Amino acid sequence: MNLTGKNAVITGGSTGMGFATAQLFVERGARVVITGRSQARLDSALARLGPRAAAIRGDVASLADLDALAAAVTDPIDALFVNAGIVHTAPLESMTEELYDDLFAVNVKGAYFTVQKLAPRLRPGAGVVLTTSTANVMGMPAISAYAAGKAALRSMARTLSAELLPRGVRVNAISPGPIDTEILAAGMPADAAAQFKADRAAENPMGRLGTPEEIARAVAFLAFEGTYATGIELVVDGGVTQL
Ligand SMILES: NC(=O)c1ccc[n+]([C@@H]2O[C@H](COP(=O)([O-])OP(=O)(O)OC[C@H]3O[C@@H](n4cnc5c(N)ncnc54)[C@H](OP(=O)(O)O)[C@@H]3O)[C@@H](O)[C@H]2O)c1
């Protein structure tokens, strides 16, 4: 689909799936605003995305930063990819209040208020895509707080759909399985990270991790092409939750 004349905002657009989605949207002709906390990562992304992309530095856990983002984005938005997220892994007995609060501040509160603050800018016909995770339907150890937060986002895809549909805005979720990005083995030493990724690939029905580009194409569908879809969660996981 040609996206010339379309405007997109992607939180967490400097690396991983957010960056791959920004790349796809720009290639198809859209103008894209990406966000993230690290200016260095934003600069490096912009250098690769070219003149149709712009960056606004900010932390989605900060409502002041989200207000600044909403003020800076003056053009009507056609696609909002609510993608910024973090992972902290810890089993129940060692999860701390600090890590728990940080996960929910970024992944849940950050996503919710991103939609609230940018909703006035959404054009009728716009698509919002929330980033959940296959972790929200699986009982995987050491990610209980992360998984619970992603389950909250899955719920919001339904409720926010109901609230925004009268304005002609669709809200859906993309649920990635194991995708080869920085976050997948975040915080692990290099050898443990390599082993973790190899294990995730081996247990997957497709025998491999997914790529950020495979998620980007699914996000493009939800954001622009899936005009009769709202409130759904599109699972893109190599079949690991289904087969
Ligand atoms: N990779 C997987 O296997 C997988 C599976 C399921 C779901 N997910 C979800 O997919 C989303 C994207 O992750 P990814 O895999 O593409 O990892 P990634 O490469 O680490 O990308 C995360 C992006 O979010 C930004 N970010 C993180 N915290 C932020 C904050 N507080 N405010 C603003 N931006 C923030 C990062 O930039 P800065 O660090 O510079 O802020 C970066 O641009 C996340 O929501 C993640 O939970 C990932």
Image (cartoon, rainbow, N blue to C red):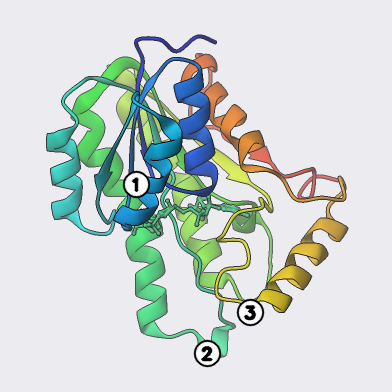
Query: Is 70 left or right of 114, judged from the image as shown?
Result: left
- Residue that sits furthest to the bottom in the current view: 93
Residue at screen point 34% across, 55% down: 40
Rendering coords of residue 145 (x, y %): 50, 70
Q: Is residue 72 above or below residue 169?
A: below
Determine crowd level at label 2: few under 14, some 14-19, many 20+ residues with C-alpha closer than 10 A. Answer: few
Rendering coords of residue 182 (x, y %): 56, 59
Query: Is 17 left or right of 139, judged from the image as shown?
Result: left
Residue labelled with disc 1: 43
Tags 2 and 3 in contact by the CB under 8 Å rule? no
Q: Report helix, strand or loop for mark 1.
A: helix
* Quadrant of the snapshot with the N terminus: top right
* Residue 12 shows in this picture: no
Camera-nearest residue between 149 and 195: 195
Residue labelled with disc 2: 94
Give the Cα separation between the discs numbered 2 and 3. 19 Å
Residue at screen point 17% across, 37% down: 70
Q: Amino acid at mark 3?
A: Pro
Camera-nearest residue between 146 and 29: 29
Q: Which mark is residue 189?
A: 3
Q: Amino acid at mark 1?
A: Asp
* Dot 2 or dot 1, earlier in sequence: 1
Q: Report helix, strand or loop for mark 3.
A: loop
Q: Is residue 164 above or below residue 139?
A: above
Query: Is 162 left or right of 123, judged from the image as shown?
Result: right
* Dot 1 or dot 3, earlier in sequence: 1
The nearer-to-camera label among 1 and 3 is 1
Rendering coords of residue 196 (x, y %): 74, 69
Rendering coords of residue 224 (x, y %): 48, 18
* Residue 19 shows in this picture: yes
